Image (spheres, rainbow, N blue to C red):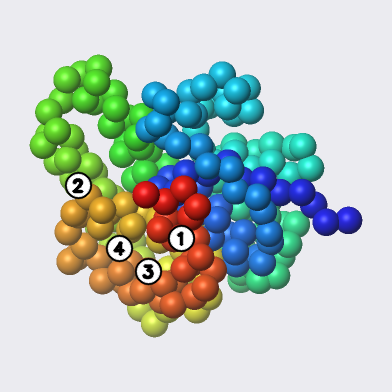
Amino acid sequence: MTASRTLYTYFRSSAAYRVRIALNIKGLGYDAVPVHLLKDGGQQRLPAYRALNPFGLVPTYVEDKRRLHQSLAVIEYLDERHPTPPLLPGDAWQHARIREVALAIACEIHPINNLRILHYLTQTLGVADEARQQWIRHWMQTGLEALEATLAADGDSGDRFCIGDQPTLADCCLVPQLFNARRFGVDLTNCPRLVAADAACAELPAFQQAHPQQQPDAE
């Protein structure tokens, strides 16, 4: 019996973008339900959606009436249920390295530039728009350059993707983060390996179809 899959998503959400990539790599169909993070005061804040996801964030992944709210948990679930092609290939050490990249992005770089953080800076703390933009660029660039240095120190300069020669969980996280970085004008000059991995991903249909501008709610 085919599972019923629904992804509550927003075209520019980094976390939802990650899950779209993973679903596409696995060749899994799903119904996309847009949740606009700006309209109606933020549709993620509406009671109906908060009942579905108490965090008031996207994505929410629903499979046969069961729900997951965290993008990395969703992707690892999909990888366990549908192991081919693997998003965590290799041995235990390679798994740890892949997770290290994914967690560096999802836990260190992305959260402090999340939309709700940026709204708090401007709407509650009264931070000026230019200062807000500086905040975004500073923390993204700082994190991405640290990630670049980490991968360079591993000595695997021949890898086509973040870790190895096939896209992994790490790339599912990297591509949305670089999309955001470019959108906010982050200088990626010192991140050649990350840029190269992103370019390799951009050649693949799974990443192309997950791109924000290919989503039904794209503006």
- Asked if residue 183 lies left or right of residue 43, the reply is left
Say whether marks 1 and 4 touch (CB < 8 Å): no
Return the residue at label 2.
Answer: 137
Secondary structure beneath label 1: helix
For disc 1, the neighbor class at 10 Å (few under 14, some 14 to 19, many from 20) is few
Of label 2 and label 4, which has the lower sequence position? 2
Judge by depth and name the residue closer to the eye, 43 or 71.
43
Please, is residue 147 above or below residue 142 in the view? below
**For the residues carrying marks 3 and 1, which lies nearer the camera in this image?**
1
Instruction: Tell me the number on the disc at residue 214.
Output: 1
Find residue 56 and report its horizontal and vertical position in percent.
51, 27
The residue depicted at 22 percent of the width and 50 percent of the height is: 184
Amino acid residing under circle 2: Arg
Residue type at the position of mark 3? Asp
Q: Element under label 3? A: helix
**Which badge, 2 or 3, comes first in the chain's sequence?**
2
Mark nearer the viewer, 4 or 3:
3
Disc 3: which residue? 198
User: Can residue 153 be seen in the rendering of this structure?
Assistant: no
Q: Residue 5 location in percent, x, y?
A: 71, 49
Disc 2 and disc 4: Cα gap in Å? 16 Å
Which quarter of the figure has residue 70? top right
Question: Which is nearer the N-term, disc 1 or disc 4?
Answer: 4
N-terminal of the pair, mark 1 or mark 2, is: 2
| Amino acid, disc 4 | Glu
* Real-space Cα separation, disc 3 to disc 1, in angstroms: 17 Å
Disc 3 or 1, which lies upstream in sequence?
3
The image quarter containing residue 48 is: top right
